[in-house]
Image (cartoon, rainbow, N blue to C red):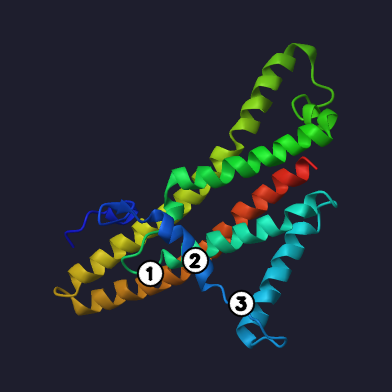
Amino acid sequence: MNENLFASFIAPTILGLPAAVLIILFPPLLIPTSKYLINNRLITTQQWLIKLTSKQMMTMHNTKGRTWSLMLVSLIIFIATTNLLGLLPHSFTPTTQLSMNLAMAIPLWAGAVIMGFRSKIKNALAHFLPQGTPTPLIPMLVIIETISLLIQPMALAVRLTANTTAGHLLMHLIGSATLAMSTINLPSTLIIFTILILLTILEIAVALIQAYVFTLLVSLYLHDNT
């Protein structure tokens, strides 16, 4: 294959115009809705999964934290559908872009931290200096805790970007090897193709797990500040 290894990570354009916005807005259109009193099996399963996910994430929150339930459920659905659509051939995965992941992580993290400083400022400031810290270590520990707080959204974004990018690169490399070996050795091609199928199944699981991990970490940051 003569295609560049990183060509699939380049933001696509249509007639010279960026198409990333249209791609980001496309996943919500795939979520079915019902206008009837009795839902079909697909919508019933979808509602059951949403209730199960929201229950797991919202159990540890108080009343103020549960006001974020709609936002967190929408976030996990958006990331999961975007990751799954990115596994299709010749498609683009917005979550492989660090800029987009930072655009999701920073506002959510900042909102949780600001809420913590507004509602429980003493507890929020107590995180910077654990109880029983020796006096000579206080300045250094405050700096370390401040850096660890500020690096949280970067860790969120980098984790999602690295996992999605690594999976796409590995699938691209194994797919290229399968195509190259198809004209050389058929048994080896079948073995590599089997590995590619197993990797694709693994990537589907990773796409869902990364959406859950991203949302769960945002939920934990919210829990620490409410």
Lower sequence index among marks 3 and 2: 2
Lower sequence index among marks 1 and 3: 3
Question: 136 or 95: which is nearer to us?
Answer: 95
Residue type at mark 3?
A: Thr
Relative to residue 189, is residue 119 drawn left or right? right
Residue 137 in view in this figure? no
Question: 181 or 148: which is nearer to us?
Answer: 148
Where's residue 8, x and y in %? 31, 57
**Residue found 60% across the figure and 57% down from its top:** 75
How many C-alpha atoms fall within 10 Å of the one at disc 2: few (<14), some, or many (≥20)?
Answer: some
Residue type at mark 2?
A: Pro
Relative to residue 31, is residue 98 drawn left or right? left
Disc 2 target residue: 27
What is the spatial separation of the Cα atoms under label 1 and label 2, in whole angstroms? Answer: 13 Å
Residue type at mark 1?
A: Leu
Label placed on residue 88: 1
Question: 163 or 23: which is nearer to us?
Answer: 23
Where's residue 143, x and y in %? 65, 20
Instruction: Give the SS element for disc 1.
Output: loop
Relative to residue 1, is residue 131 drawn left or right? right
Label placed on residue 33: 3
Where's residue 29, x and y in %? 51, 70
How many C-alpha atoms fall within 10 Å of the one at disc 3: few (<14), some, or many (≥20)?
Answer: few
What is the spatial separation of the Cα atoms under label 3 and label 2, in whole angstroms? Answer: 13 Å
Lower sequence index among marks 1 and 2: 2
* Residue 190: quadrant of the picture: bottom left
Q: Is residue 118 above or below residue 35?
A: above
**Residue found 67% across the figure and 17% down from its top:** 140
